[in-house]
Image (tube, rainbow, N blue to C red):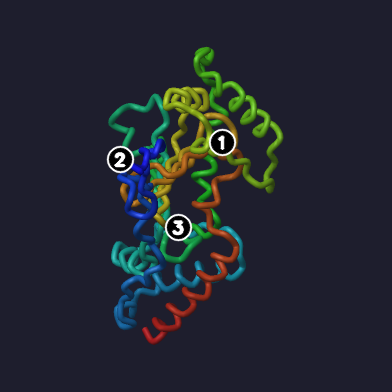
Amino acid sequence: MNPRPFPIPVVAAGPGSQTEDETLEYITMPSGMDTYRAPVLPEPEELAGHAGTRAVLGQVLTALRAGRPERIPLFALSDEDRRLLDQVLGEGEVAAQVLARPGLRAVDADAARVRVQESVFAGVWRVRSVEDDGATSDHVEVGAVPAALVAAAAEDSATTRDALPPVPPECVNVPPLLVELADQRARWQPGDPAHVVNLTLLPLAPEDIAHIDHQLGTGRVLLLSRGYGNCRITNALVPHTWRVVFYNSQDAVILNTIEVGALPAVARAAPEDLADSAERLAEVLQWLEPA
């Protein structure tokens, strides 16, 4: 007898039997990390005769060991002393600036700002600023974060803003977020943990995020932190609110957040960071002592 045709088509199964119409695309993860790199130290004899540099480093070490904020002015140092100081301190992961106040003449706009560079010793900052009246300041600051950044953010949040237009009706997910953020701002007190809203995980269109940014405003404080990829932090024009965006090594956004609280922890030196910096700076000064 002739076999009848099998009514169900036979389909091969198992690994390699199926064709792939699409290629899976994975997010590119960071490929490098900035870690502590010891500065290229001068030879001990190079510090001979530079008592000013050594005195400043000693003050920094004392403040680190005490775990207290301290501002050490550098106006009395010679240019050579400052170069030696910068060589010992090196450059760390965090840099920041405070932009000029709105309304200043264009010729003053670039000068009336604060520039901050963290050293390789976490919690030790080089701060240079030019005030509105032209007065300049150059100092080393020891602490979790330079006071000028916090002061500028507080000043921005106290600025009177023009009435903002209502959120467009098509941005249905924006009003609840704005209410949540306003409630958190009203309740936050110094010492409280930050309240973080992860925009990356929410069903938000680019237009939604643009309207949120417009409602919050953008202040004058900008921080860049380098670790895995880069982190960009800006203050909002409302109290205790920060925009924190993480990028991978290809400059693609991998995390987009809003934080209500103190300056975000990614840019602050923790108490244990200060203690570690004290130990490492003590080792550096011990090596330089023969000078």
* Residue 106 numbered tag: none
Quickly name the residue at label 3.
Answer: 125
Q: Is residue 212 left or right of residue 16?
A: right
Q: Position of residue 88 (x, y in %)?
A: 37, 70
SS assignment at label 2: loop
Residue 58: image location, x then y, percent: 49, 72
Q: Nearer the viewer, residue 105 or 222?
A: 222
Looking at the rendered structure, which numbered label has been put on residue 241? 1
Neighbourhood count class around disc 2 (C-alpha, 10 Å): few under 14, some 14–19, many 20 upward: few
Q: Mark 2 vs mark 3: which is more N-terminal? A: 2
Mark 3 or mark 1, whichever is nearer to me: 1
| Helix, strand or loop status at disc 3 | strand
Residue in the image at 43% along x and 23% along y: 207
The numbered dot on residue 21 is 2
Q: Earlier in the sequence, mark 3 or mark 1?
A: 3
Mark 3 and mark 1: Cα distance apart in space = 23 Å
Residue density around tag 3, few if under 14, some if 14–19, many if 20 or more, within 10 Å:
many
What amino acid type should be assigned to the residue bearing mark 2? Answer: Asp
Instruction: Please report the residue visible at 31 percent of the width from the left and 83 percent of the height from the top.
Output: 45
Q: Earlier in the sequence, mark 1 or mark 2?
A: 2
Q: CA distance from mark 1 to mark 2?
A: 45 Å
Q: 18 and 225: which one is in front?
A: 18
Image coordinates of residue 17 in percent, x first then y, are 33, 50
Q: Is residue 143 above or below residue 289?
A: above
Kind of residue indicated by mark 3: Trp
| Residue at the limit of the structure toward the front, as seen here | 1
Dot 1 and dot 2 residues touching (CB under 8 Å): no
Whether residue 91 is visible: yes
Residue in the foreground of this view, choosing between 88 and 18: 18
User: Do the residues under discs 3 and 1 have CB atoms within 8 angstroms?
Assistant: no
Residue type at mark 1? Answer: Thr
C-alpha distance separating marks 2 and 3: 54 Å
